[in-house]
Image (spheres, grey):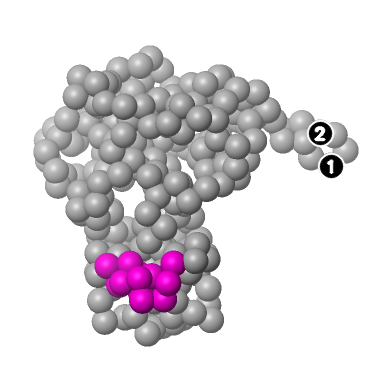
Amino acid sequence: MRQVKDNIATQKVKISCENIRKIFIQKGDQQVHVLENISLDVYENEFLVILGPGQSGKSTLLRIIAGLETPTEGKAFLDDKPIEGPGPDRGLVFQSYMLFAWRTVLGNVEMGPKLSGVPREERRRIAQHYIDLVGLTGFEKHYPHQLSGGMKQRVGIARAYANKPQVMLLDEPFGQLDAQTRLFMEKETERIWQTDKRTVIFVTNNIDEAIILGDRIVTMEGKLPGRMGMQVYNVDLDRPREPTDMEFLKLRHQITEASELVL
């Protein structure tokens, strides 16, 4: 199953998942089998997309990498060290905005450095840098209720970056946005990653989004328990990518034909 570009394969493995299995125990000792035999390597500064339909376990896998869930069997590693809980080396952006309603844009973005004990002047400098990076210059004093959905998600991305994580984990962050805003945010996410490179794992159920963003696309099969698909797609298209380009459409057709995803 492992098919990787030569230039990626020679890079350092940043995240590794080995034979991960996850079972949730619900009320009455009922077992919900969520993940089965998940093995995956993610390379340093790679933009990896995990593509799968709803209820395929892809968000649970991301939460295991984030340290928010513990595998029933198997291990996840960061730089060859077992992941045993959350840490500042991983930044997580959820589908829901998860902003502090009582704090401004600046207050939200500087929260991580503040909790880490960074002095006020330095954390303001860090926060302003990432506010500028995500294109929210001039909105520092706005509160979340004054922002559009896309702007709120930019704040979430800036807040995650402000902790200076080695790995960014994005769990269907644009699922609540309208189609036009979603496409714009995909382009912005690519721009931000190109400007401030780090390892990114991005979860989505949208094929076009996966092709626009990914260096590689790995697939999750069917319904629970989630398993890795047989195909790994190397996206050898120039950036930025346009959904109307012929090579884009060919890859889209290839993934669609091989998957159970609903467009």
Residue 169 is situated, as x and y percent measured from the top left of the image, at 43, 46
Tell me the chief SS of the magenta region: helix
The answer to whether the residues at label 2 and label 1 have Cβ atoms under 8 Å apart is: yes
Residue at 33% x, 30% y: name it: 43
Q: Nearer the viewer, residue 33 or 263?
A: 33
Q: Amino acid at mark 1?
A: Lys
Answer with the quarter of the image where residue 132 lies.
bottom left
Q: Quadrant of the N terminus?
A: top left
120 is within the stretch colored magenta: yes
Answer with the quarter of the image where residue 73 lies.
top right
**Where does label 1 land, which residue?**
27
106 is within the stretch colored magenta: no
Q: Quadrant of the C terminus?
A: top left
Residue at 49% x, 66% y: name it: 117
Query: Which numbered marker is on residue 30?
Result: 2
Find numbered disc 1 in the image and state the secondary structure of the residue it sits on: helix
